[in-house]
Image (cartoon, grey):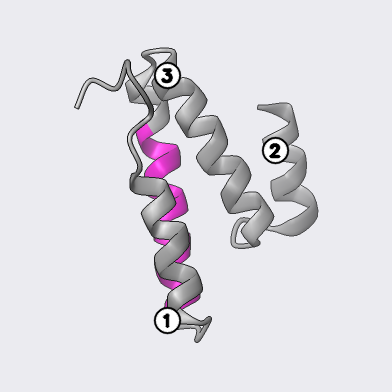
Amino acid sequence: REDLEACRATLGDRHPDTLTSINNMALLLQNQGKLTEAEPLLRAALQSQHQRARDGERRDAIALRIQRLALPAGPHDPR
């Protein structure tokens, strides 16, 4: 979590590396069964991706990142 906060402070919430870190933290929490902690992170990453798309980033790059956000967490995924 400290690394994520450092990334946010250095690069900002909408930087692709920050979004990857947010997603990775959310997936880690999801795999640990901490779904209530993971959900806001996933929502924040998704919201940032949509904002980047509105700001004109290439839509195919955005679609790929959004698709990665939606991938199941693995064999313990409760969905």
Q: Are marks 3 and 1 in contact (CB under 8 Å)?
A: no
Which one is earlier in the sequence, the residue at label 1 or at label 2? 2
For this rendering, which residue is in front, 79 or 37?
Answer: 79
Q: Give the range drawn in magenta.
A: 39-53
For marks 3 and 1, give the one nearer the viewer: 3
Q: What residue type is labelled 3?
A: Asn
Q: What residue type is labelled 1?
A: Arg
For marks 2 and 3, give the one nearer the viewer: 3
Q: Does the magenta stretch include residue 72?
A: no
Residue at mark 1: 54
Which one is earlier in the sequence, the residue at label 2 or at label 3? 2
Residue at mark 2: 5
Screen quadrant of the C terminus: top left
Residue 26 locus on image (x, y percent): 47, 32
Residue under the point 39% across and 16% down: 34
Secondary structure mostly seen in magenta is: helix
In this view, 33 is above or below 45 = above
In this view, 36 is above or below 39 = above
